Image (spheres, coloured by chain):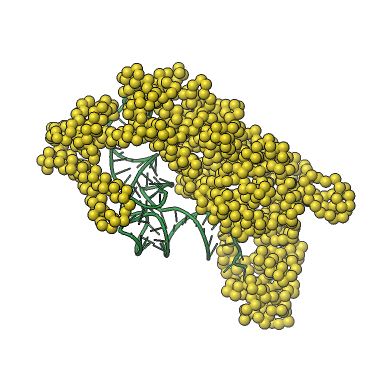
Amino acid sequence: MSEQLSKTYDPQAVESGLYDMWEQKGLFRPQPGKKQETFSITMPPPNVTGKLHMGHALDTVAQDALIRYKRMKGFETIWVPGMDHAGIATQSVVEKQVAKEEKKRRQDFSREQFLEKIWAWKNEYGGAILSQLKALGASCDWDNFLFTMDDHANKAVKHCFVKLYNSGLIYQSDYIVNWDPKLQSAISDAEVEHKEIKGAFYHIKYPVKDSDQMLEIATTRPETMLGDTAVAVNPEDERFKHLVGKTAIIPLCNREVPIIADTYVDLEVGTGCLKVTPGHDFNDFEIGRRHKLPIIKILSKDGRLNEECGKYHGLTVDKGRKAVLEDLKGLELLVKVEKHTHQVGHGDRSKAIIEPMVSKQWFLNVNEMASEATEAVRDDRMRFYPKGWENTLFSWLDNPRDWCISRQLWWGHQIPVYYCDQCQHQWAAEDRPENCPKCQSDQLTQDPDVLDTWFSSGLWPMTTLGWPDPQMMKEKGFERFFPTSVLVTGFDIIFFWVARMMMMSLKMEKQVPFDKIYIHAIVNDKHGKKMSKSSNNGIDPMEIIEQYGADAMRFTLAAGSGYNRNLNLDPQRIGGYRNFINKIWNAFRFIHPFLEQADSTLPKLSELDHHERWILTEFNQTAKVVNHAMDEFRFDDACSAIYAFVYNKFCSWFIELSKGVLHEGSPAETQRRATVLKFTFRKVIALLHPMTPFITENLWSHLKSDDERELIIQDFPEFDANLDFPEDGQQMNHMVEVITAIRNLRASVDIKPKEEITVQLFSDSAKMSEYLKAQQINFYQLAKVDQLIVSDKSVSRPKKSLMAATDQVEIFIPLEGVIDLDQQIARMKKELAKVEGELGRHQKKLANKNFADNAPNEVIAEVRAKADAAQKKLAAINQALLLFGV
RNA sequence: GGGCGUAUAGCUCAGCUGGGAGAGCGCUACCCUUACAAGGUAGAUGUCGGCGGUUCGAUCCCGUCUACGCCCACCA
């Protein structure tokens, strides 16, 4: 007890060492608790290339708060951390590095060589984010850490793939996909972002063979005409009906193509004639299928025009477009150019313009899996918080398109499909086979593609718990922890990730992957703008932690998190909550010297005094609110309840009221008060621990007894009916009201804080009078009232005084000759008007027959009570005004 | 084009199943009161986006308009 406590809270000093202590003592590991229930969370694995940003911080804080809450409640908890190999992102980083340092391209290396480079990079630079999670206080179980490219994860992926392959859900097909020319890989629909681009409609004439007629088509992508294999019109279109079945000639390449009729063509749009490019347009691909049109690919992997394009071969799409237009102009086939803005797909990673392109890819048929997932949400086996997000999920799952799962990358899980070079047999296998099962040849080739990163992510909640290895599942407690309790994530990956986990888990294990899904807000800057490098409005969590401490940042994020979808973060708020942490710190400094006098248990309840019963009651209410809020993921409500209790109850009143007792009370009183202070404060920091683990654990070390363990595994406070004293609560509220009124009166005439005053109170209630008399000493401490006279209302009131009234008590401060009478009268008249207004409203309501007939009884009673109180107040003020001669 | 969401104090946001509005920050005044000036006490501020409707009563429910977000979508 002899150590010096700094006057202000110093986050660096307070927080340091605690994380290592928790970890070294194994407190993050699952431990059976008193509840006999489990609570598990799988951490959304951050990218190996990632740095902590505010979004992660919020995600982490929400999860950690839940885990700590449940751990303290006595659940056996596990929070499994991991890291994602982030196929595209990581490969790009290393490609850039190699380009810079060695002036080489990926293709200059063998696959094995390049993968070695990526692993080397990963081991050296990857995972910086993990230590940042620790700085935040994330109490995850590092012993169960998993990297998505670890052997075990790889086995899980292969196991799943083979199962799906053998059941026929995974198939290979020449299909039109989103091709990212920068990555030179296919990407899935979900990875395409549509952005508005200013382009143009080019109207082009196609000659009709053996005629002088021309068909006018409109397109935003004229260069794709080099791949046209038909022109389509609507079968009902009178303008073109007679041309159906004839042949059109594609200019520039002079290809003869059929003119076909297809209902897809809209009579109203464009010219009514549609050029059909099955190789490079999603709709045209479908039309092509219906009409068995040939497919001509005009682009190479890097997005340039290929050898099909004759003289345009080698040009980029952009240059090709210009050249094509130039030539059309020369042939007088370019009719007009209209400005037009339209949506163009971009790769969400590479930002490159996506080219629809036919290529051979692997697909997962998700039809059935999607409806299984939908059903599981509809019948409440999984529940979204807030519930509204399930619509977002449904909108996607309700019209599923097969998922393109192959990527033409090296970094990732290589597709476990093998080809026999001898007999062309193709099959999938979990372990690399030695021989072809058909012809026994040992000349085998594995499919070169890797799987979409989200394929492995989709298995994540299972993989991290040992699936599908029976031994490992046993060790990691799959039985106990799966389905996981809650998934905490942002709405931006509902499609990418949440939906995929649902599908995979239901397919593989016939179980949902999690019971609840808490979707938290996206963190923006204080004006609601997305934080981004280009706007330069990002707030770096690590800088905040350095400046204000992890606890202040955590509390800020938690206080801003409920069912909202945006959290607009104002750094000033963090400062405000840092002050709150400081408040806690100083409350402790106040209690600190008295700890030695405190007992370790509360005295008999009958011995507690009024204020002690009151603070225990208030704490009880707070604990109730916090528990409820935490169960519903209302971190905002939990935080504000604690915040209000600490400031408005514990510090402002209980500590203030305790000063007299502690300094001037009898030894027994002092000891009792010290005991209650300690008892309550211990509870408060326990209640706060999920939000602000560092300072609370630090303070706990001063407050715990020798045989008690760390706060992180202490009981979480809950409502305790034995410590609930409603009557004391009500009385105390009256006293607070009276004291506030006195302070108010003092302020109104600038009575200096140090100046002592006399106050006369009048009340009709004997009980109230008695109570107020008993509180006399507190009036001195809280409002510098050195003389308090309490009388019943038969006693005449002092003249020319400061006067105020509550519904039960009249308050007079006699200051004859000192006060400005007119000023006081004006103040009282203002108050009078306010109360009159209130009363009028209530009376009007009560007089309304419809109200009396229809409103519920309790509402009527409430209004009547309010009217009553207003009436009494009004009478008191009126009477006082009479005394003033008004 | 469809869908979702948001409009409440100067700023950022709460407001539970309808009974007449709250918090934090900021602001004003006065205080270095022996836990804390990262503090204390007191205070000011709102046609609860507009217009209709339901109801005894609407910030809350319904309709509609306006503004701003976000998501989805193949209008060539």
Q: Is residue A756 above or below residue A278?
A: above
Q: Is residue A491 visible?
A: no
Chain appearing in yellow on the rendered image: A
Q: Indicate the quadrant containing the N terminus of chain A: top left, top right, bottom left or bottom right.
A: top left
User: What number of labels is visible?
Assistant: 0
Nearer the observer, A287 or A501: A501
Whether residue A21 is situated above or below residue A61 in the rendered picture? above
Residue A304: percent from the left, percent from the top?
71, 59
Where residue A53 sits, quadrant-wise, is: top right
Given residues A186 and A366, the one toward you in this image is A366
- Residue shown at 53%/26% (left/top)? A710
Question: Horizontal placement of A595 versus A487: left or right?
Answer: left
Q: Choose between A724 and A54: the one closer to the eye.
A: A724
Residue A140, given in percent of the width and then of the height, sits at 59, 35
Residue A501 in the image: x percent, y percent? 63, 48
Can residue A601 be seen here? The reply is yes
Give the residue at x 64% y 73%: A263
Q: Which chain is green?
A: B
Relative to A513, residue A620 above or below: above
Q: Is residue A374 left or right of residue A646?
A: right
Q: Relative to A4, is A133 above or below?
A: below
**Where the C terminus of chain A falls, by quadrant?**
top left
Q: Residue at x 37, y 20 (%)?
A: A671
